[in-house]
Image (tube, rainbow, N blue to C red):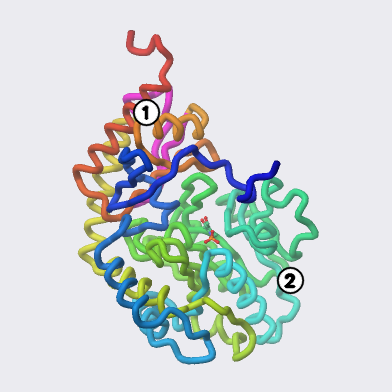
């Protein structure tokens, strides 16, 4: 018999009743160290006091009014995002998938408004993940996500990951945009080198294309800069944000330059819940905390220590790990064992990690991870690795 909850997830047999910082408490009181942070969502950890206070105060005042009216909390968050980034304007969504939908619509409408209605094509990359709507799975294109769900949205062409020469070769008269995650998350913590980011920008400029960055997973301080693309010095025309921006409250956004947003006039897009006062009040507080340079400095310090210790861990367990990659606190351990087996061994050590493609285990801790928690995390990763080592190892 089908369960009452549609069985689309392979869930671990764990459930939690409480969270505090980087810790989650299971029903039986066992504490788990959380290096997954709700898949890069709980950027400030669980039950951050400032977020609890903000959401409680806003909940007592006003939750929802619709976008028929001005929403001051929305304007405050949009102003902060515009002030801190390449963007001139922001639309709020409830998720990363919705941000993808708008990014695609915006790019096509921009080309249309500029007199290029034929430029509907979007180049995307193999191994990418942009969500689960029909457009989002069409963008990613993998058989795993698309099989049985056709017909897909036409116009997407997948390029092998990081192959910018193939991207250039694929540009034709109908190409209108390039869509890329600066660091692939689900694809296995695969950063696009700065030189490739620059080449994509050049290609976009030469061919009149919009460059769309999906920073749903790698954005909001995760890499040690407010947004991951800042490391490369390259800016997009359109950017998708979600996950960390709400600190656990469902919130997403599309940021764009004025030129990219030129076609998005009144009536061309909307959302009932997007940009509601509750979500935007939380988002504004998250933004205030994460965009503080001293907060990002601390993320980089933690990340530096973590990276160093992970290199040591890899060296100590050559049968289990192949290497470590990523940037900031968006890290991946490339494993020689099945990532799911490592994640399971982590559960046995009361440690939460997240599997990804390309034989990678993701480490996406709260950005607030403390020095003692970091040491504890490494100790538990070490014990999890030992559990998977052949019995004869070290004998
Ligand atoms: C890079 C990226 N884009 C888009 C999405 C989709 O976001 P959501 O699950 O909030 O719809 C995700 C989710 O994992 C993601 O990692």
Horizontal and vertical percent for residue 169? 68, 58
Between 287 and 319, the residue placed more toward the observer is 287
- Looking at the image, residue 133 sits to the left or right of residue 356; the answer is right
Residue drawn where x is 46% and y is 53% of the image: 193
Horizontal and vertical percent for residue 5? 61, 50
Q: Quadrant of residue 382?
A: top left
Kindly check if marks 2 and 1 are in contact, taking CB atoms under 8 A apart as contact. no
Q: Which residues are magenta?
A: 315-335
- Looking at the image, residue 151 sits to the left or right of residue 195; the answer is right
Gap in Å between the C-alphas at discs 2 and 1?
50 Å
| Residue 384 numbered mark, or none | 1
Horizontal and vertical percent for residue 12? 50, 39
Label 1 crowd bin: few (<14), some (14–19), many (20+), radius 10 Å: many
Q: Earlier in the sequence, mark 2 or mark 1?
A: 2
In magenta stretch: residue 333:
yes
Determine which residue is flagged by label 2: 174
């Amino acid at each position: 018999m089908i369960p009452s909850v549609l069985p689309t997830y392979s869930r671990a047999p764990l459930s939690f009743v409480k969270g505090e910082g980087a810790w989650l408490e299971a029903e039986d009181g066992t504490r788990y160290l959380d290096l997954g942070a709700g898949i890069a969502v709980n950027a400030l950890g669980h039950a951050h006091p400032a977020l609890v206070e903000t959401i409680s105060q806003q909940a007592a005042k006003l939750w929802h009014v619709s976008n028929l009216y001005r929403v001051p909390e929305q304007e405050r968050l949009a102003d902060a995002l515009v002030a801190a980034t390449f963007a001139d304007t922001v639309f709020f969504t409830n998720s990363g998938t919705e941000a993808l939908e708008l990014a695609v619509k915006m790019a096509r409408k921009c080309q249309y408004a500029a007199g290029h209605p034929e430029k509907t094509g979007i180049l995307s990359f193999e191994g990418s993940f942009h969500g689960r709507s029909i457009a989002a799975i069409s963008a990613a294109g993998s058989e795993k996500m698309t099989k049985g769900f056709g017909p897909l949205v036409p116009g997407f062409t997948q390029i092998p990951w990081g192959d910018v020469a193939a991207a250039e070769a694929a540009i034709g008269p109908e190409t209108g945009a390039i869509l890329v995650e600066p660091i692939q998350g689900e694809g296995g913590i695969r950063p696009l080198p700065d030189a490739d980011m620059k080449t994509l920008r050049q290609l976009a400029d030469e061919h009149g294309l919009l460059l769309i960055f999906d920073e749903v997973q790698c954005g909001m301080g995760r890499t040690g800069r407010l947004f991951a693309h800042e490391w490369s010095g390259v800016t997009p025309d359109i950017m998708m944000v979600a996950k960390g921006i709400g600190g656990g409250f469902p919130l997403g956004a599309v940021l764009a330059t004025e030129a990219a947003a030129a076609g998005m006039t009144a009536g061309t897009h909307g959302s009932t819940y997007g940009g509601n006062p509750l979500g935007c009040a939380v988002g504004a507080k998250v933004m205030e905390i994460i965009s503080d340079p001293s907060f990002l400095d601390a993320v980089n310090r933690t990340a530096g220590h973590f990276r160093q210790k992970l290199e040591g861990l890899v060296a100590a367990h050559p049968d289990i790990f192949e290497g470590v990659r990523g940037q900031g606190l968006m890290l991946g351990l490339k494993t020689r064992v099945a990532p799911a087996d490592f994640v399971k061994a982590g559960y046995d050590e009361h440690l939460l990690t997240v599997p990804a493609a390309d034989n990678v285990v993701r480490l996406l801790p709260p950005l607030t991870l403390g020095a003692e928690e970091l040491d504890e995390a490494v100790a538990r990763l070490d014990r999890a690795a030992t559990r998977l080592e052949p019995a004869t190892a070290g004998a």
